[in-house]
Amino acid sequence: MASIAATADFIDHAAWRPKHNPYVIAVTVTLATFMEVLDTSIANIALPHIAGTFGASTDESTWVLTSYLVSNGIVLPISAWLATRLGRKRYYMSCVALFAASSFLCGLAPSLGMLVFFRILQGYSSMCRKATKICCHSCAPTASCAKCFSSGWV
């Protein structure tokens, strides 16, 4: 036991390197953020087509956007707690899997009500942005993390 404590005193924390390349991790988690932003942009652009396809008014079809934003806003405050509780990697992977599944279900939605429901699921699982910041912050040095966040990638 004493030898473990003795070796812990001699660890050079300044020379410590992560086990995986932090830039590869940053690019990987940023792709999911891009997927989320792209999905939001597509829903905004496709709003008139959604209204026409489901025979709804423009006001009714805006629920597709509103439901996503409200569910995203509800889950956002607890995302850091969830990442700590579940583990950052597991939380991130579950967010991406649920987001992909709910995106697929949005594409198969037979009615506007089902589309709104699947968009609520999508908004719940779209914590990719927050999970991206949590993952990048934990695997990159502080200076690299600040540079990555300030560049707009995350």
Image (cartoon, helix red, strand yellow):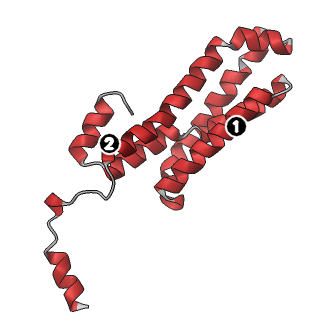
Q: How many numbered callouts?
A: 2
Q: Where is residue 28, by image quadrant?
A: top left
Task: Name the residue rendered at 30%, 35% in the picture.
Answer: 148
Residue 36: percent from the left, percent from the top? 55, 30
Q: Secondary structure at mark 2?
A: helix
Q: Give residue 154's mark.
A: none
Q: Amino acid at mark 1?
A: Ser
Q: What quarter of the picture does the N terminus occupy? A: bottom left
Q: Which residue is mark 1?
A: 102
Q: Amino acid at mark 2?
A: Tyr
Residue 144: percent from the left, percent from the top? 24, 41
Task: Name the residue rendered at 64%, 38% in the picture.
Answer: 100
Whether residue 59 is visible: no
Left or right, 5 with reference to 80: left
Task: Name the residue rendered at 35%, 52% in the picture.
Answer: 138
Q: Secondary structure at mark 1?
A: helix
Q: Nearer the viewer, mark 1 or mark 2?
A: 2
Whether residue 38 is visible: yes
* Mark 1 surroundings within 10 Å by alpha-carbon count, few (fewer than 14), some (14 through 19), many (20 or more): many
Q: Where is residue 71, by image quadrant?
A: top right
Say above or below: 140 vs 71: below
Estimate the spatial distance between the alpha carbons at disc 1 and disc 2, rounded to whole Å. 28 Å
| Earlier sequence position, callout 1 versus callout 2 | 2
* Mark 2 surroundings within 10 Å by alpha-carbon count, few (fewer than 14), some (14 through 19), many (20 or more): some
Q: What quarter of the picture does the C terminus occupy? A: top left
Q: Hey, which residue is sitting farthest bottom in the picture?
A: 1
Q: Which residue is mark 2?
A: 23
95 or 80: nearer the viewer: 95
Say above or below: 61 vs 3: above
Left or right, 120 with reference to 33: right
Residue 41: percent from the left, percent from the top? 57, 19
Residue 108: percent from the left, percent from the top? 79, 29
